[in-house]
Amino acid sequence: MEEDMAMTYSYACKEFPGMETCPAHFHAETEGELWKIIELHASLAHGEDASAWPAEDIAQLKALIKTD
């Protein structure tokens, strides 16, 4: 019997420079869903506006997203 090996995406906020004390860690079924969670978390927990993130920060965030 084959196991369902669906890929998931994860992100740990503490891995982003300057966020080392943040305990938030998220998992989602799609990368798009994970981005929505990251943006919501940034707004609620850190008072950030994701639409104002510079391209360098977005690239760094993308590099920190892991697939399981």
Image: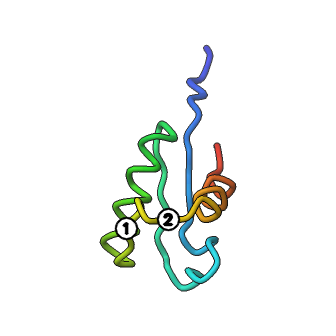
Instruction: Name the residue furthest left.
Output: 44
Give residue 55's position: percent from left, percent from top: 60, 59
Q: How is the image coloured?
A: rainbow
- Residue 54 position by quadrant: bottom right
Image position of 64 with respect to 19: above or below = above
Q: Quadrant of the C terminus?
A: top right
| Residue type, mark 1 in image | Asp
Give residue 27's position: percent from left, percent from top: 48, 51
Mark 1 surroundings: few (<14), some (14-19) or many (≥20) residues within 10 A: few
Residue drawn at x 46%, y 45% is 28
Residue 37 horizontal side relative to residue 66, left or right: left
Residue 58 horizontal side relative to residue 40, left or right: right
Depth order, front residue of 18/24: 18
Secondary structure beneath label 2: loop
Image position of 45 with respect to 2: above or below = below
The residue under label 1 is 49
Residue 33 horizontal side relative to residue 57, left or right: left
| Residue type, mark 2 in image | Trp
Residue 53 horizontal side relative to residue 56, left or right: left
The mark tally for this picture is 2
Q: Are marks 2 and 1 in contact (CB under 8 Å)?
A: yes
Image position of 6 with respect to 8: above or below = above
Give residue 16's position: percent from left, percent from top: 61, 72
Secondary structure beneath label 1: loop
Residue drawn at x 30%, y 72% is 44
The numbered mark at residue 33 is: none
The residue under label 2 is 53
- Residue 21 position by quadrant: bottom right
